[in-house]
DNA sequence: TTTTATTTTCAATAATTTTTGAAAGTTTCG
DNA sequence: CGAAACTTTCAAAAATTATTGAAAATAAAA
């Protein structure tokens, strides 16, 4: 396969992966483009490469910066802004996990905790409900804690712990 | 809080959580409704509770059955079908993980593997690309393996391993 | 300061996804 | 078998989400 075709295939794949996880397709594609680029890219270059508008590039680049997975890079002799994505994939994974945890897990956990304790009723039915809320909260808290640990870990840690687990 | 209000709040919360993870809102709400119901529900009851059409109920209930988290239950003296969701939340978590892994992780892993080995080019640029694909594949494979382990585990296992990890 | 380059915003538009509802299909019962 | 009860399908409509593009804002250069 030709390098350019492989890059395009990767960018497409990343776009659909994002869609299936509730993330904007273009946002993922801009990130993918930067990730496989050997040099910082300007808004114009991103527009050209992905055939999207300036406004779209701007919004998605800002979102990526907000997620902490893309940053501005100054290029000598250039007035416009250039962007890069770090190539450390383990860091990328941790950062994405951290953001999703903050945005999409923790607020739900908060509501579950309210629900498990906020119902006064003591009927059989209410107890069943509270049990379900409690179990949802418990599993979610456990997963959340594991993700926390992963966020702080280095890749080697994860791999070695994983290997130990497997062997048990 | 009144039990009915708490149920409604939970159903709404689950719907938006689903949306943010790329899952149909109604599908999640039907599941949430069944999860907090103390008895099997018919299509008519689901329509009434969520104020949605028969077609919508049918499609989403089928999808939930396909995901393995809802099943039909026969009710004596009734001709129509009734549905239930198992209340074992750890099992639910494992089943959802299993399905998402199969649907949304493994196909991507396959493509990454093609990309990391399918580029003939040996330029500096091509090597950078292959390195990125390789790292993506490696992190994804590790995570996939951990999920595999979780799917096979019981809740106690996860909790105890997690506790051990934390202490290190 | 004025001009020019560049970035940002956001209302309008387009694309995508979800839902409806009625017709067709199926199953059960008399 | 034929009718009634129930389920499924899917084209059209509605709702949601994403994108455009031009005007406004900002920043740098002259």
Image: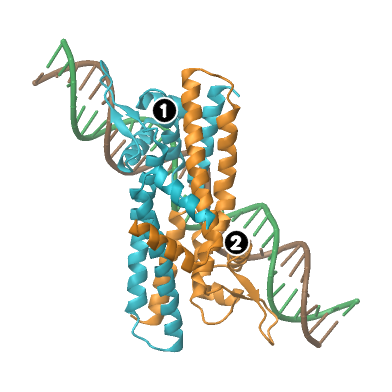
Chain colours: A orange, B cyan, C green, D brown
Residue B60 is situated, as x and y percent measured from the top left of the image, at: 37, 38
Nearer to us: label 1 or label 2: 2
With respect to residue B111, does B165 lie above or below? Answer: above
Horizontally, residue C11 falls left or right of residue A45, namely: right
- Report the residue at 41% width, 43% height from top: B156
Horizontal and vertical percent for residue A84?
Answer: 58, 75
Task: Decide if residue B11 is in sight here.
Answer: no
Pointer 2 chain: A
Say whether residue A55 is left or right of residue A134: right
Q: Residue A28 vs residue D9: left or right?
A: right
Residue at mark 2: A67
- The C terminus of chain A: image quadrant: bottom left
Distance from the alpha carbon under mark 1 to that under mark 2: 39 Å
Q: Nearer the viewer, residue B132 or B19?
A: B132
Label 2 sits on a secondary structure element that is helix
Provide the residue designation for mark 1. Answer: B47
Q: Residues within 10 Å of mark 2 (few under 14, many from 20)?
A: some
**Residue name at image x 47 percent, y 19 percent:** A124
């Amino acid at each position: 396969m030709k390098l350019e075709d492989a890059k395009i295939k990767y960018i497409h794949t990343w776009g659909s992966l994002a869609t299936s996880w509730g993330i904007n397709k273009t946002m993922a594609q801009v990130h993918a483009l930067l990730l496989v680029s050997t040099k910082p890219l300007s808004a114009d270059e991103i527009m050209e490469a992905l055939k999207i508008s300036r406004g779209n590039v701007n919004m998605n680049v800002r979102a990526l910066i907000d997620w902490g997975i893309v940053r501005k890079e100054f290029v000598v002799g250039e007035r416009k802004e250039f962007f890069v994505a770090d190539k450390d994939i383990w860091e990328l994974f941790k950062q994405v996990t951290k953001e999703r945890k903050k945005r999409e897990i923790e607020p739900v956990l908060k509501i579950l905790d309210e629900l498990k304790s906020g119902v006064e009723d003591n009927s059989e039915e209410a107890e069943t409900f509270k049990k379900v809320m409690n179990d949802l909260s418990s599993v979610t808290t456990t997963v959340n804690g594991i993700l926390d640990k992963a966020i702080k870990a280095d890749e080697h840690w994860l791999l070695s712990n994983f290997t130990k687990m497997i062997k048990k």
